[in-house]
Image (spheres, rainbow, N blue to C red):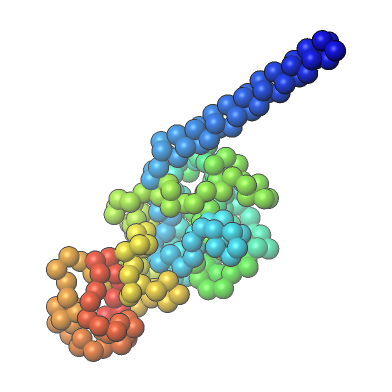
């Protein structure tokens, strides 16, 4: 009887040790992941200029990146230094480029119209990889952009929200602007393709289902009113309200307002 009790106590002790070891490992992994995101937070430049038309985790959790709508031919650049790991035509991604970065991340640039790089090529951040297009399984011109904490795999188990690592600096949002652009560097058009990274500030006038890329728009700044904007763009308050689906004259800083049709 004593031997049975001893054996039972030993088994319980071993079980507790294994459990503590497992929990410790999981905690270490979680802390390592969190520290990694804190270190790398907002270090990538934006790969193109346009409007975010879909975000990470939509489509019942099966959308593993963000979509940036833009005109066909808009430059697409590498988000950071790295090496081209893949550059080919996919049934789903269409014309696509994969970049392995020095920090261990891998980024994906899909549905391109043109590809300008080849596998094994060393790339600097901001170097042009191709142009925005509508190839593969796509509906409308846009860049599908993914970030993976490690190497890409078929299950996309290492995918993270690109907004965790994309820079909030204005200069990094216009990363592709210094290259030849379909917008021809027109000041009014540059407002129309402002990268909408601050999604909470989109407000009533920023319905994500409406694609305003290519239309003249203005981002609302502090002190702006519908009256001042109507005077600036030689239109009327009533037209601004109609174009933007506004029920009253209140607007929010960060909103994008269509200013002409």
Residue drawn at 60 percent across, 42 percent down: 151
Would residue 211 appear left or right of 256 to someone viewing this image?
right
Residue 58 seen: yes
Instruction: Specify the quadrant that holds the C terminus.
Output: bottom left
Give residue 180's position: percent from left, percent from top.
Answer: 37, 62
| Residue displayed at 49% across by 65% down | 54
Q: Look at the picture and state if 75 lies above or below 87.
A: below
Q: Quadrant of residue 110?
A: bottom right
> Looking at the picture, does residue 7 appear above or below residue 155?
above
Between 247 and 244, the one nearer to me in the picture: 247
Q: Nearer the viewer, residue 140 or 229?
A: 229
Which quadrant of the figure contains the N terminus?
top right
Determine the residue located farthest toward the top in the rendered image: 2
Answer yes or no: is residue 233 visible.
no
Determine whether, in the image, residue 138 is placed left or right of residue 5. left
Against 22, is 208 above or below?
A: below
Q: Residue 95: x and y, percent? A: 59, 61
230 horizontally vs 166: left or right:
left
Q: Position of residue 175 (x, y in %)?
A: 36, 54
78 left or right, relative to 240: right
């Amino acid at each position: 009887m004593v031997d049975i009790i001893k054996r039972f106590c030993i088994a319980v002790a071993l079980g507790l040790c294994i459990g503590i070891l497992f929990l410790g490992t999981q905690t270490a992994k979680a802390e390592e992941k969190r520290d990694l995101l804190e270190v790398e937070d907002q270090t990538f430049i934006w790969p193109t200029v346009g409007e975010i038309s879909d975000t990470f985790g939509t489509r019942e959790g099966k959308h593993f990146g963000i979509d940036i709508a833009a005109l066909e031919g808009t430059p697409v650049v590498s988000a950071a230094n790295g090496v081209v790991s893949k550059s080919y035509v996919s049934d789903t991604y269409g014309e696509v480029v994969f970049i392995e970065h020095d920090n261990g991340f891998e980024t994906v640039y899909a549905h391109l119209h043109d590809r300008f790089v080849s596998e094994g090529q060393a790339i600097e951040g901001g170097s042009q990889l191709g142009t925005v297009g509508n190839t593969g399984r796509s509906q409308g011109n846009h860049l599908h952009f993914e970030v993976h904490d490690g190497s890409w795999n078929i299950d996309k188990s290492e995918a993270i929200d690109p907004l965790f690592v994309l820079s909030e600096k204005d200069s990094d949002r216009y990363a592709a602007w210094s290259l030849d652009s379909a917008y021809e560097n027109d000041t009014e058009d540059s407002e129309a393709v402002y990268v909408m990274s601050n999604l909470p500030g989109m407000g009533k006038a920023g319905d994500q289902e409406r694609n305003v890329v290519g239309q003249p728009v203005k981002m609302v700044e502090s002190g702006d009113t519908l009256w001042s904007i109507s005077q600036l763009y030689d239109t009327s308050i009533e037209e601004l309200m109609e174009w933007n689906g506004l029920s009253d004259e209140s607007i929010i800083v960060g909103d994008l307002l269509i200013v002409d049709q």
